Amino acid sequence: MRLVALLCLAALAARPLPAQERGAFNAPAVDHHQHLLSPASAALVNRFDGPSAATVRLSPELAALIEQRAAKWNDAAALADMHTADALLVERDAVQGRAAVAAALAKRFRSGYRLVPTKAALGQSTAQVAAYLVRGEGAATDFFGSVHFSLARNADGAWRIAGESLHFPGPTYYKPTAAADLIKLMDDADIQRAVVLSVAYFFGTPFAPAEPGELDRVRAENNWTAAQAAQFPDRLLAFCSVNPLKDYAIGEVERCTRQLRMRGLKLHFGNSDVDLSNPDHVARVRAVFAAANRLRIPVVAHLWTQGRNYGAKDSRLFLDQVLPAAPDIVVQVAHMAGAGPGWTDEALAVFAEAVAAHDPRTRNLYFDVTTVADEQPPERLKQLAARIRQIGATRILYGSDAAFGGRKTANEEWGTFRGMVPLDDAEFAIIRSNVAPYLK
């Protein structure tokens, strides 16, 4: 019962706030952590991480059945022929029996769709197939749901569907997100300004196969982000991005700053596979921070890495060996030193203790709370509130990541943070009003 209550509370806190309620929650002044996605970057993400990459080839018999199941989506008679006599359909409620299942499916959807198989397990007489329910093509593709099929062979050897389990909504399919799309989200949330962080580092990640023209694609993404933000100069501030381990990193940061007039730098240690226990990596990252300091541009640093043991040691290495290279600029630690949803407390504790001890290296250190309250249990949220108080609310910047891949809106993210983290009204008022020094 307690779990059900907590889930209901989380859903309530994360819901979009109607216009008449927003005043009570007082929308943040600035969203300090947003992204846009060009058509090229959206295609890249979907190619390696999106649902379109998770497909499987079925045997001709099974493929034909799944194709027929989608083609006859509202034909009760045809659907009945595809199911076993005691077939079971599970969604909100369970429906059993060939005729009942077929009737329920024929009335369930308003328009047709495709089924894209993603996984399959085939036995002699039984099989399991997972698939996405898909509408649209190209940039308009909508993976709006998923289904799990249990199949069995009839006496005549033909496959029939013994069970279906439908799930909604479907997985995230990353679509291009332009500045105008972000402005609409900001207007809906009553947020006036946003920091747009380029995702050009996607094209320098070592986790995708190397392709020729990498630097050209990095530059193109930074160019696109700068041009998009320039359409709304009073509301959007563009930061460039690079993989800091690349030989071209400093040159690209200088180009973005001097030619594109981008106002800051986003680094993503996880995507770039930075390892601060590697002296060569430390030297390269430190050099990029030193360049940012020389150019007087702030850095938003996603410090979480791919390492299994990411935590306190990484923060100490960053504090001791990297941060001193940038003493004169704001460094904004993304996701409270985690990756979102949630944060990594072992990593955050090192920074919180240094700030509380008035360590001079933390003089210009700030933290954004982007998605840190999402999917967190009450005890973890109490711990988060304690860390915020240890750091001091004046260093905490609101961010949502909301435009990225069609996640929750900026309004919902603020509702989650405001509704779930056990801070008091005065603390929320400070965080809501905070504006990073680089925006003043």
Image: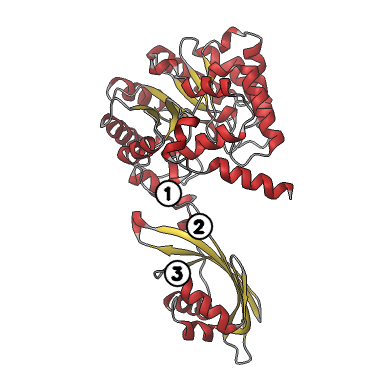
For disc 1, the neighbor class at 10 Å (few under 14, some 14 to 19, many from 20) is: many
- Which of the two residues, 135 or 430, is positioned nearer the viewer here? 430
Report how far apart the C-alphas of labels 1 and 3 lie in the structure. Answer: 24 Å
Question: Residue drawn 29% across and 35% down?
Answer: 228
- Which of the two residues, 62 or 33, is positioned nearer the viewer here? 33
Residue at disc 2, secondary structure: loop
> Marks 2 and 1: in contact by CB < 8 Å?
no
* Above-or-below relation of 32 to 439: below
Q: Which mark is residue 230?
A: none
Q: Quadrant of residue 405?
A: top left
Residue 4 percent location from the top left of the image? 68, 50
Q: Say which residue label 3 marks.
A: 109
Report how far apart the C-alphas of labels 3 and 2 lie in the structure. Answer: 15 Å
Residue 275 percent location from the top left of the image? 59, 30
Q: Which mark is residue 174?
A: 1
Q: Nearer the viewer, mark 3 or mark 2?
A: 3
- Which of the two residues, 272 or 18, is positioned nearer the viewer here? 18
* Above-or-below relation of 163 to 429: below
Q: Quadrant of residue 30?
A: top left
For disc 3, the neighbor class at 10 Å (few under 14, some 14 to 19, many from 20) is: few
Q: Nearer the viewer, mark 1 or mark 3?
A: 3
Three-letter code for the amino acid on which mark 2 is drawn: Gly
Q: Say which residue label 2 marks.
A: 170
For disc 2, the neighbor class at 10 Å (few under 14, some 14 to 19, many from 20) is: some
Residue 69 percent location from the top left of the image? 48, 77
Is 103 on the left or on the right of 357, as rendered?
Answer: left
